[in-house]
Amino acid sequence: MIRLPFAPSALGEDLIEELSGAIDLVASGAARTIVLAAFPGVEDVAADALARAQRAGVRFAVSRDGQAVTVHIGPREE
C-alpha cells in the first residue's frame, strides 16, 4: 500500500487533484491499488473522480462504514 500525503483541509479541486494523483499511480502501474480512508468531502467529487478513473481504465469505488468514507482505486481494468 502506498500512503499519499493528505491535508485535512483539501476540498474541491484539491481533493480532485489528490484522487487524480492516486488514479495516475494505478494507471501507470506504480501501484496496484490505493485505499484512501476518512477522506472528508469525497462524496462531493466522486462522480468527477469516477469519470477520470474510467478514462484511465482504473477501477474506482466509494464505500461507507458509519461516518467513515473510504475510496478504493484500482486495480487496472483488463
Image (tube, rainbow, N blue to C red):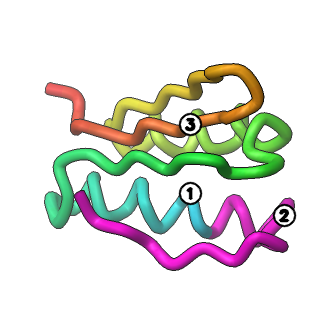
Nearer the N terminus, badge 3 or badge 2? 2
The reply to whether discs 3 and 2 touch (Cβ–Cβ < 8 Å) is no
Magenta residues, start to end: 1-17
Nearer the N terminus, badge 1 or badge 3? 1
Tell me the kind of residue under disc 1: Leu
* Picture quarter with the C terminus: top left
Does the magenta segment cover residue 71?
no
The residue positioned 69% from the left and 59% from the top of the image is 16
Rounded to the nearest whole Å, what is the CA distance between mark 3 and mark 2? 15 Å
Mark sitting on residue 11: 2
Rounded to the nearest whole Å, what is the CA distance between mark 2 and mark 1? 11 Å
The residue positioned 46% from the left and 32% from the top of the image is 60
Tell me the kind of residue under disc 3: Thr
Task: Give the x, y percent position of residue 17.
Answer: 63, 68
In this rendering, position of residue 70 left or right of residue 32: right
Tell me the kind of residue under disc 2: Leu
